[in-house]
Amino acid sequence: MQSTLTRRPQATAFSIEDLLDRVRRGEVRLPHFQRPLRWEAGDVRDLLDSVYRGYPIGTLLFWKREAPAASVSFGPVRIDAPSHSQALWVVDGQQRITALAAVLLHPGHESSPRDGFTLYFDLEAQDIVQPSPSELPPPHWLPLNRVLDSEQLLAWLDRYPGREKNPEHVRAAIRLGKAAREYQMPAYVVEAAEEKTLRIIFKRLNTAGKPLTDDEVFNALYGGAAGSRLPNLKALAVSLMDLGFGRIDESLLLRAVLAVRGLDFTQDFQKQLREEDDLTETLLQTEAALRSVIVFLKRDAGIPHGRLLTNPLYFVLLARFFHLHPEPSPRSRDLLARGFWRGSLVDSFLDSRALSPQELLAAIGPEEEHSVQSLLAQVRPLSDEWLAQHAQPATFGLALRSRGMALNALYALQPRNLHTGTPLEAAQLFSDTEPVSLSPVLRELKVTEPDAELKLDPALYRSFLFTPANYLLHPPLPGQPMLDALRASPGPSPEVLHSHAITPAMLGMLREGGTLEFLMQRMELIDRHIIEFLRVRTRYEESDRPSLQSLVVEEED
């Protein structure tokens, strides 16, 4: 049974000067269940910058209890702490307290070796900076380990050679010292609790909350101003839904925004963008580019809905391309569609690592024709031997290796309604909130006479229920299983059957009870159709030359 606190936590506040004075006296301690210091130099700099600018830096939580004499470390700061009857054990705030102590109480001098806690205040730029290991700090850089103690700060200013010429530097240094000393950190102090209770509190403070996703952090840091048409990624996703392509995931939209801006969308955006960057215009540019991308995917690449995207990488790359080239020529659109499917094929069936996002992004430049040719060159040609090998009977496996490619191939057959024979619209098959409309033919498999002679392992036999061969790209039929609709007399026409990769012979087999044989033959047929589908989409046998117009221009030059 978990214990409860017998006293409410005391709400208080510590100035940084008071808090670090307690650190110096050995009154502040770190429980052994605390994590090691994980902050990097940039995190430490940002914390001190927040203190200087008066930004909130969070609440502290202490556990008040006795502490034995011990050697305590806060980064490079070593404290020989005596025993205390009412020490403050840090439950939440270790990284912040360590950073403050390590910088402001740093034992080093100007000539000492520098580490990640050696920070300075640039009196000219009025900014906190960190020199490189080989960099000699200029005279107007004030060491931050001189600002907490008023006497040390005044002594440094007395020696400062720019004191007379730049009186504003003196005022800036004094303001910094005052800000550092008087900054108030809110805190709670817990008393009379067991260590087990503190462990629970620590765990819930540090792990119970769900961390923000990258797109949530982006919206918080770089969302547009209130009243702007596209204030964030969520608004961008909503604005694209009128194209009937489905709702694009905000994490994918974030990558598209970075690509439009010309940044590496595979890396942490916070390391590439500055806090003061305004991305309102970039969001609008991304919307325009993605509208062109979606029209291209639907019209040129034959992708009616986002659910059929097999490789999101090309969605992001196309955002960059259409941002730079909003109205490409018909020839460029044709070649882009080939490149899209070639890249999708390599990603689905060969080796996704063969596609380098950085190299593909770098291939897209200011010249349209050159960009298209460079993108095509990044995807290795597929050999005729590979296509021929996978087109052989009894080599099925493509549909198993890429469900997405199987769905695209089945959709390309233009599936029809089993009852009416009318073509099924994309809106009937793909939804933003529901899975793709895949309806099983068989709910269970029983070994019947026509299948018994196959002598397959029962586990393998049942596994066919979960292959693409057992599913039709068709919405559910109210009150009627798919198997009954197929076995009905009269049943679907040959044209309707063909639209679902079923032959009349296969249907006859199904009616006679050869369910496993039906699934095996349909799997083989789907695989053959995938091969033909890829031949048509990738068009490896055709020339990838640029437009004739571009060739003529090159000759004239």
Image (cartoon, helix red, strand yellow):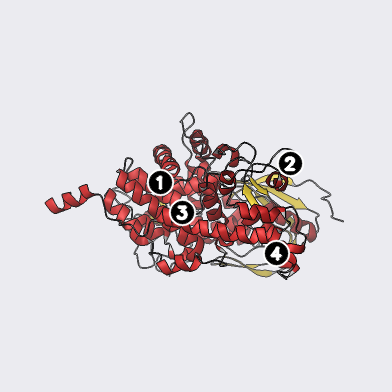
The residues bearing labels 3 and 1 have C-alpha atoms spaced at a distance of 10 Å
The quadrant of the rendering that contains the N terminus is bottom right
SS at circle 1 = helix
* Residue 319 marker: 1
Label 1 with label 4: CB-CB less than 8 Å: no
The residues bearing labels 2 and 4 have C-alpha atoms spaced at a distance of 60 Å
Q: Residue at x 39, y 67 (%)?
A: 133
Q: Which residue is under mark 2? A: 480
* Residue 313 marker: 3
Closer to the observer: label 2 or label 1? 2
The residues bearing labels 3 and 4 have C-alpha atoms spaced at a distance of 42 Å
Q: Amino acid at mark 1?
A: Ala
Q: From the viewer's perspective, is residue 416 above or below residue 509?
A: above
What is the x, y in percent for residue 511? Answer: 71, 52
Q: Amino acid at mark 2?
A: Gln
Q: Nearer the viewer, residue 390 or 437?
A: 390
Q: Nearer the viewer, residue 509 or 520?
A: 509
Closer to the observer: label 2 or label 3? 2
Indicate which disc, 3 or 1, sits on the residue closer to the N terminus.
3
SS at circle 3 = helix
* Residue 421 marker: none
Indicate which disc, 2 or 1, sits on the residue closer to the N terminus.
1
Indicate which disc, 2 or 3, sits on the residue closer to the N terminus.
3
Q: Residue at x 58, y 44 (%)?
A: 496
Q: Is residue 267 visible?
A: no
Indicate which disc, 3 or 4, sits on the residue closer to the N terminus.
4
What is the x, y in percent for residue 403? Answer: 57, 56
